[in-house]
Image (spheres, grey):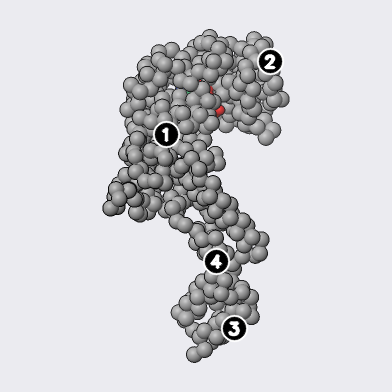
Amino acid sequence: MVTVNKPMDLPREIDLIFSLLSARGYSAYVVGGAVRDHLMGRCVNDYDVCTDALPNEVEAVFSDFRVIETGLKHGTVTVLIGDSSIEITTFRTDGSYSDGRHPDSVDFTRDVIKDLSRRDFTVNAIAYSPKEGYIDPFGGCNDIKASIIRCVGDPIKRFSEDALRILRALRFSSSLGFEIDKETSDAIFKLKSNLALVSKERIRDEMKKLICGDGMSNVMHYYRDVIGFLIPELTATFDYDQNNPHHDYDLFTHTIKTVAYLPKDPVLRFAGLLHDIAKPLSESKDENGISHFYRHAQSGAEIAEAIMKDLRFSNTEIKRAVTLIRHHDGVIEETESAVGRKLSKIGVDLYFDLLDLQRSDNASQKEDTSLRAEHNEVLRRIANDILKKEPCLSLSDLALDGNDIKDLGFKGKEIGKALSILFDAVINGEVENTKEGLTHFLTDNFKD
Ligand code: ATP
Ligand code: MG
């Protein structure tokens, strides 16, 4: 819903910023995502302010507040007011872009229109102030109404200046559910290889947002050549016939369906995106001509690890996604001991992530997958029942510790071995995790 005439309801800190700047004769606007999201009727959390005051002038105006020189070179200072930190950026024009990534120089200007014209998309190039209302020189309000992402100015020029904008277009198309205008879209395909100029960290950050957007499936399919440029290992899954009665869809379609079913957690969704990446490499055909993909989970985990390292995901994120991929096709029996073993092996959080991945994976194989969905629910129930009962999920949860075992006459390496035997026995339901039960178990099984 677009409400162009409706004034923005600004938080008190922003009102204060406007009045302090205005009292010194400066102009100021809210700009970018906040204005766009407000016009779409979305909730706004982050307000960026732009002004004609130069950075040192901004610092002088806010001398009673804490001010951080966030990006002085680019004209940005952050002002801390109460619990909020607000970025205030001086209007600027960008110089030439010789590296396809950053402007060689930035110049400050007193003209808001010039500042808006350096911004990436029309929907992000609207400024608002309570005094002047909306300043929309590039038709951003109409594009919001029509749900369109369109470059400000010539797309070829804008993507050549900064290739990250290519991926930002996909990200906004996904997160806002907007179509990309034809001319902008043509330029995306034409210049996709310029993404090689962009840092992996920036690609990772945009990909995380893209993969969690409502329009993710459409974007991933329509722009799969761009995604394939960023993650070449995925291209083998495009139109790949799985040639197996358990699968109705080609591998890339199956993959994207899996991602779409997953909660909007970027790492979990990356695990979904990469979970079958090794299938084309693992294919073998049986005597009936049906394809199988033995060990694809294991090899997929290795390939995913390399991809995520390359994209500079953190070690914790990589470990989480890779563990899920490695375990994604393992069958868990519907018994307390099997579920207990899995819980202790991968941990409680990963266990539920794994069930999310398995449920999404199964739901994306065929039209009717209700049976396997039921199995997934049973595995959740069993785990929840176990967790209600003070479960034994690691050696330290055992009712006996190393000293107790020493007191029973075990020495040196025997102690560790006894602990691990007890742990397996508890997880397998052979013995209750009580001091008495474990002591009996040890003395019965190791009389000598
Ligand atoms: P989000 O809600 O995801 O934060 P946003 O529109 O605020 O969306 P930011 O990445 O925070 O996006 O950028 C703030 C604004 O800065 C954008 O709205 C846009 O006007 C401008 N901008 C950001 N990155 C670029 C870029 N690479 N090229 C041109 N303009 C950009
Ligand atoms: Mg923002």
| Disc 2 residue crowd, few under 14, some 14–19, many 20+, Cα 10 Å | some
> Helix, strand, or loop for circle 3?
helix
**Residue 408 x, y percent position in the rendering:** 56, 85
Q: Upstream in the sequence, badge 1 or badge 4?
A: 1
Label 4 CB-ligand 1 distance < 8 A = no
> Helix, strand, or loop for circle 4?
helix
| Disc 4 residue crowd, few under 14, some 14–19, many 20+, Cα 10 Å | some
Whether residue 107 can be seen here? no
Observer-side mark, 4 or 3, equals 4
From this view, report whether residue 187 is shown above or below residue 395: above
Identify residue for label 2. Answer: 7
Q: Amino acid at mark 4?
A: Ser
Q: Upstream in the sequence, badge 1 or badge 3?
A: 1
Whether residue 385 can be seen here? yes
Identify residue for label 4. Answer: 337
Identify residue for label 1. Answer: 203
Quarter of the picture holding the N terminus: top right
- Which residue is drawn at the image coordinates 45% and 28% (left, top)? 219
Mark 4 and mark 2 in contact? Answer it, CB < 8 Å: no
Q: Upstream in the sequence, badge 3 or badge 2?
A: 2
Residue 440's disc number: 3
Q: Amino acid at mark 1?
A: Ile
From this view, report whether residue 89 is shown above or below residue 349: above
What is the residue that sits farthest to the right in this orientation? 12
State the CA–CA distance, disc 4 to disc 2: 60 Å
Residue 341's disc number: none
**Residue 407 x, y percent position in the rendering:** 57, 84
